[in-house]
Amino acid sequence: MKDNNVIELSAIRTTCQSCGLYQLCLPMGLDQGDMDKLDKVIKRQRKIERGDHLYRMRESFTTVYALRSGSVKTYSTIENGQEQVTGFHLPGELLGLNAVSTKFHTDSAIALETSSVCEIPFDRLENLSHEIPSMHHHLLHVMSEEIQHDHCQLMMIAKMPAEARLARFLLSLSYHFSQRGFSSTKFNLSMSRNDIANLLGLAVETVSRLFSHFQDEGLLTVERKSIEIHDMDGLMNVTTKCASHPLPGKSPSSDSLS
Amino acid sequence: MKDNNVIELSAIRTTCQSCGLYQLCLPMGLDQGDMDKLDKVIKRQRKIERGDHLYRMRESFTTVYALRSGSVKTYSTIENGQEQVTGFHLPGELLGLNAVSTKFHTDSAIALETSSVCEIPFDRLENLSHEIPSMHHHLLHVMSEEIQHDHCQLMMIAKMPAEARLARFLLSLSYHFSQRGFSSTKFNLSMSRNDIANLLGLAVETVSRLFSHFQDEGLLTVERKSIEIHDMDGLMNVTTKCASHPLPGKSPSSDSLS
DNA sequence: AATGCATCTTGATCTGGATCAAGATCATCC
DNA sequence: GGATGATCTTGATCCAGATCAAGATGCATT
């Protein structure tokens, strides 16, 4: 990291190619010429503050958003006002595509912290992907990933006990941070306990208790939003001790696992 | 059209256009010329028996399947051998697309009864969709629907009590049958209680008890695989009694059963 | 028709995690 | 700084639904 101000200013009119995320993001795998075409369509760097919505459920779908920095929560609200959190999103992710079939959004996206996004009008993106086969493929790719992710989530909620869900959630976060060049062991949670509980199909109290419990076990240190993982393998063990061996007293944490 | 045999034989080499499902299936919204192109790519009417797999988890992804008749269960198996049912599928649905990102299947698809499918090599389908913009759009459409469906499923398992889940499942089945020209009140379940329980994140015993309970309440009659719904509104009340969610109401948007 | 096996039902118990309750900690605003 | 309200933690209870157990029913196979 060099000097923040200089980088941010120049980035505004910069190309996808110069964006640190381009390997994770929409232009993944595009050649120079195609990337230029994409660059012409993208509206770069809209800044959004914590609590701002990228889009809301039922709004008409016109734009997809590439998250550039910060983090975003997607959720849908049910008739009775309850909300279901469907995911947390980190830089490089594409948001909004799941509205293709309905033409209006079926979920809402809200910034969890100050963030920035690139906006891509969907009709132009579609036109572009008629010219650029790999772009077309990439859109399918992104959606396919989301489906697979949702299936994991489903399995998790349907079959895994609370502690395994939270452990898995933390490991997933850790992985995604490391993928983006951040520490995999020390990071901040931008979402509330409530949001985590909601995503995992648990009560807030349960999440809170589990954090304390993990800390007592020496797996991690948690203080408010800040997490430091001390025993990655131990956490992994927690995720796999679903319905496997029925061992009443839990084994003395740090040991085994390859 | 004179005699049944003749019709069936001719159907084998018939076009998408003559297929009763074409409005639900891949060629949805294509014009004559484009449909002809599609027809050239499709391998029609492969017959599969109950218990046959369309594809298995980890197999390489080459083909998408359009279900023509019968019904199919998709599921993935977890490390410890447990299985998670991700959906039941009826004629007109497209299967396998979620493997685009990995290039190998992350779930398995197995016939619940004698069924038939049309096979479409994915690379040819992709090429075709470079020529046919609306085909490209349709693929995105189908995947977007699946994501929306999965989000509903998530919400259901995370937030709704057991009886609401089963009621919603039955109503969804009913809706999808009626959409395909079958009775919405009297139908057969091609899947086992176990599969239903698995999809809904419940124990078999719970599903069994709920069926009995619904019957005692006069909402429906159930005998083994056969269901007759007597009080559709009553069933809907069950789904809204606790946590509520919009049912597959008007547009033929959300496909795939919940 | 008898055998064996899988699926389904029903009842009796047990428990993971929800809910209720009460503080503690933090953030914001005056 | 002090007040107010949100968020988070911890403890005590409760219950929906899992698990355990035992039949009942159906269905292949011989």
Image: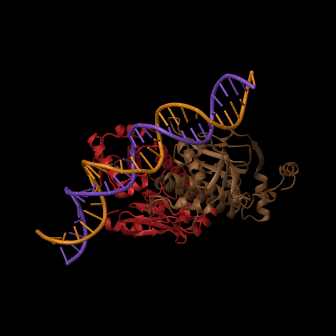
Chain colours: A brown, B red, C orange, D purple
Q: Residue A31 location in percent, x, y?
A: 76, 65
In which quarter of the view is residue B73 placed?
Answer: bottom left
Residue at the location (54% across, 64% down)? B38
Depth check, front residue: B77 or B144: B77
Residue at the location (34% across, 48% down)? B183
Q: Is residue A38 visible?
A: yes
Q: Residue A89 location in percent, x, y?
A: 65, 50
User: Left or right of A10: which side holds B124?
Assistant: left
Disc tally is: 0
Image height of B255 relative to D11, above or below: below
Depth check, front residue: A197 or B46: A197
The N terminus of chain A: image quadrant: bottom right
The C terminus of chain A: image quadrant: bottom right
Image height of D3 relative to B153, above or below: above
Q: Can residue A103 be seen in this view?
A: no
Q: Residue B212 location in percent, x, y?
A: 28, 47
Q: Residue B7 location in percent, x, y?
A: 36, 65
User: Left or right of A131: which side holds A241?
Assistant: left
User: Left or right of A229: which side holds B246?
Assistant: left
In which quarter of the view is residue A51 placed?
Answer: top right
